[in-house]
Image: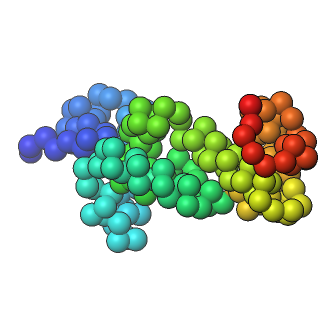
């Protein structure tokens, strides 16, 4: 029998898989389940396609910016880019200069700033509209980035910030 390989799992048949041990077997099983799910949902061609590299990452970045409220997990973003999670996270960090999670939080933070500058929406609504799980998560993000609360940010008024 000829050896078949998978770009994510390595050799799929023969002594290589047996010698690899339980960790490799689990990785192969997970990959095969993902392929099965992709085939059942009609995404097999997209999932099996070679990664699009920079264009795929830019496309995902634009998608994140367009809807920061979405479910922006690494798994979902990687699926959208047609890449494995590991490869996606690596390429994303190279292209964006930040991990997917940091990029998502930055995008949500910028959306919140815009809403605070342009609207009088309550903080809970600003948090929801910008993709944060709630007002507390919004406050934590503002404290991490600016050292102030969203209310203090709003009170300073729109315009350039330090």
Q: Residue at x 60, y 38 (%)?
A: 102
Specify whether residue 30 is in view.
no
Residue 81 horizontal/vertical position (percent): 39, 53
Residue 78 horizontal/vertical position (percent): 44, 50
Specify whether residue 96 is in view.
yes
Looking at the image, is 23 positioned above or below residue 6? above
Looking at the image, is 27 positioned above or below residue 132? above
Give 120 or 90, whichever is nearer the viewer: 120
Q: Residue at x 29, y 28 (%)?
A: 19
Give 87 or 159, whichever is nearer the viewer: 159
Please state, as top left, top right, bottom left or bottom right, where the N terminus lies in the image.
top left
Q: In the shown orientation, is residue 155 left or right of residue 40?
A: right
Residue positioned most to the left: 2
Asked which colour scheme the image uses, the reply is rainbow
Looking at the image, is 97 positioned above or below residue 116? above
Q: Residue at x 73, y 62 (%)?
A: 129
Residue 159 horizontal/vertical position (percent): 75, 45
Q: Residue at x 80, y 39 (%)?
A: 142
Give 113 or 60, whichever is nearer the viewer: 113
Q: In the shown orientation, is residue 1 left or right of residue 60?
A: left
Residue 15 horizontal/vertical position (percent): 21, 32
Please state, as top left, top right, bottom left or bottom right, where the C terminus lies in the image.
top right
Give 140 or 18, whichever is nearer the viewer: 140
Q: Report the number of numbered marks.
A: 0
Q: For residue 16, which quarter of the picture?
A: top left
């Amino acid at each position: 029998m000829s050896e078949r390989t998978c770009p994510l799992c390595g050799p799929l048949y023969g002594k290589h898989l047996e010698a690899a041990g339980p960790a490799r077997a689990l990785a192969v099983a997970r990959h095969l389940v993902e392929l099965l799910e992709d085939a059942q949902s009609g995404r097999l061609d997209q999932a099996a396609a070679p990664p699009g590299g920079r264009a795929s990452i830019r496309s995902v970045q634009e998608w994140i910016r367009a809807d920061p409220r979405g479910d922006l997990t690494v798994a979902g973003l990687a699926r959208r880019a047609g890449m494995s999670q590991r490869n996606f996270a690596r390429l994303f960090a190279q292209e964006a200069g930040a991990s997917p999670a940091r990029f998502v939080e930055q995008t949500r933070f910028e959306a919140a700033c815009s809403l605070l500058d342009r609207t009088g929406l309550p903080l809970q609504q600003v948090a929801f509209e910008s993709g944060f799980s709630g007002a507390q998560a919004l406050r934590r993000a503002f404290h991490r980035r600016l050292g102030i609360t969203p209310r203090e940010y709003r009170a300073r008024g729109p315009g350039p910030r330090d």
